[in-house]
Amino acid sequence: ETSYRLRFYYYTGDISGVTDIFQARSTGGSNIIRVTHDGNQLSFTTFNNGSATTAQNLTVADNRYYSIQLNWSAAAGTGALTGTVTGNSGANATANVVGTINFPNLSNAADSITEARLGMIAGTPTVTSPVYFDEFDSRRTQSPGLLCRGDAGGGTGGAPDTVIGVADRVLI
């Protein structure tokens, strides 16, 4: 794909040492997007005409859920990777933005994404409290967006319906 948008939730657990938690790769298995976690920060790297960009880092806390949203596009000089990491404390998601990343003006027209990998993919970190991954969603054009908190699917027979009501509270 020459346009790729994704969202997933990541529970940081308690780790030390670097591990890849997300990779979007080309047909040949080369990373196009790489997200790592070292126990203190998430590090984002993309590739510009085959060369790794300087990583952009966002600090995160142990044992917390974060949503990671990325938008990538390939083009000659106008390709880009942008993203937002949002924490999970409080009810207002926009007030909990941990930070954003922005890699503009990439010369990555020859790149395309053919596979995505999510989990503790590479590295040998020490894990003292487990990490979790949830709700991975990827698309070609429209960004997936965040899930509605507390929407347990009480209104429509188990499927989240973006309305939080009494039935959701019963299910929770």
Image: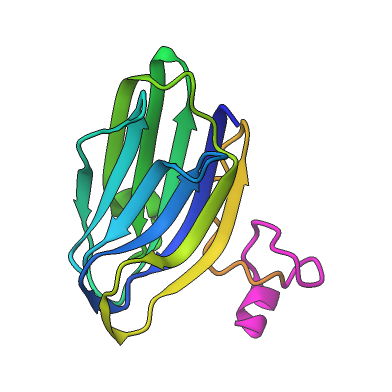
Name the foreground residue: 49 vs 153. 49
Q: Residue at x 69, y 63 (%)?
A: 160
Residue 168: x and y in percent read: 65, 74
Name the foreground residue: 122 vs 85. 122
Q: Provide the residue span drawn in magenta.
A: 154-172
Q: Residue at x 49, y 21 (%)?
A: 110
Q: Is residue 115 above or below residue 65?
A: above
Name the foreground residue: 167 vs 87. 87
Say if residue 97 shows up in the picture.
Answer: yes
Left or right of residue 158: residue 14 = left
| Helix, strand or loop: magenta stretch | loop
Left or right of residue 139: residue 101 = left
Quarter containing the C terminus: bottom right
Residue 122: x and y in percent read: 37, 64
Q: Residue at x 48, y 69 (%)?
A: 133
Q: Farthest right residue?
A: 157
Quarter containing the N terminus: top right
Q: Residue at x 55, y 57 (%)?
A: 147
Query: Total of numbered circles in the picture?
Result: 0
Q: Is residue 169 in the magenta section?
A: yes
Q: Is residue 108 in the magenta section?
A: no
Say if residue 146 shows up in the picture.
Answer: no
Q: Is residue 105 above or below residue 68?
A: above
Q: Is residue 92 above or below residue 5?
A: below
Left or right of residue 15: residue 153 = right
